[in-house]
Image (cartoon, grey):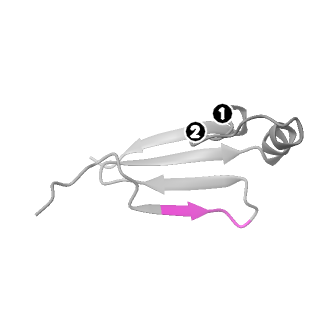
Amino acid sequence: MSPQHSHFPSKVSWSGTGNLVAITTNDFYYILRFDRDAYSSALESGADIGDEGVEEAIELVAEISDR
């Protein structure tokens, strides 16, 4: 039996407009804003987009504890 890891996402839900995303873990809900223009600009400039993505394209809107 593997231990529960509270920092691993259990659910990811995008808004209908695609500019907000909710990430749910065992202990927290995170609401993030996605800036498609910032992401597109990084792609167009030839930026190396690795596993971390484009930092300028994501903004933390809210962090809500489930406990």
Instruction: Name the side, left or right, on which 30 lies relative to 53.
Output: left
Q: Main secondary structure of the magenta part?
A: strand
Where 48 sits versus 4, above or below?
Answer: above
- What residue is disc 1 on? 55
Where 36 sits versus 2, above or below?
Answer: above
Q: Dot 2 lies on which element?
A: loop
Tell me, yes or no, whether the highlighted magenta stretch contains residue 64.
Answer: no
Q: Residue 52 carries which label?
A: 2
Q: Where is residue 17 in the image (x, y as percent from the top left)?
A: 76, 62
Instruction: Name the side, left or right, on which 6 lies relative to 53.
Output: left
- Residue numbers of the magenta segment: 12-16
Q: Where is residue 59 in the image (x, y as percent from the top left)?
A: 64, 36
- Dot 1 alpha-carbon crowd within 10 angstroms: few under 14, some 14 to 19, many 20 or more: few
The residue shown at (62%, 40%) is 50
Q: Where is residue 62 in the image (x, y as percent from the top left)?
A: 53, 40
The residue shown at (66%, 39%) is 58
Instruction: Name the side, left or right, on which 15 lies relative to 30.
Output: right
Instruction: Name the side, left or right, on which 7 lies relative to 54.
Output: left
Tell me, yes or no, whether the highlighted magenta stretch contains residue 13.
Answer: yes
Q: State the image quarter where residue 4 is shown.
A: bottom left
Q: Which amino acid does label 1 sit on?
A: Glu
Residue contact between numbered discs 1 and 2, judged by CB atoms under 8 Å:
yes
Front-most of residues 2 and 11: 2
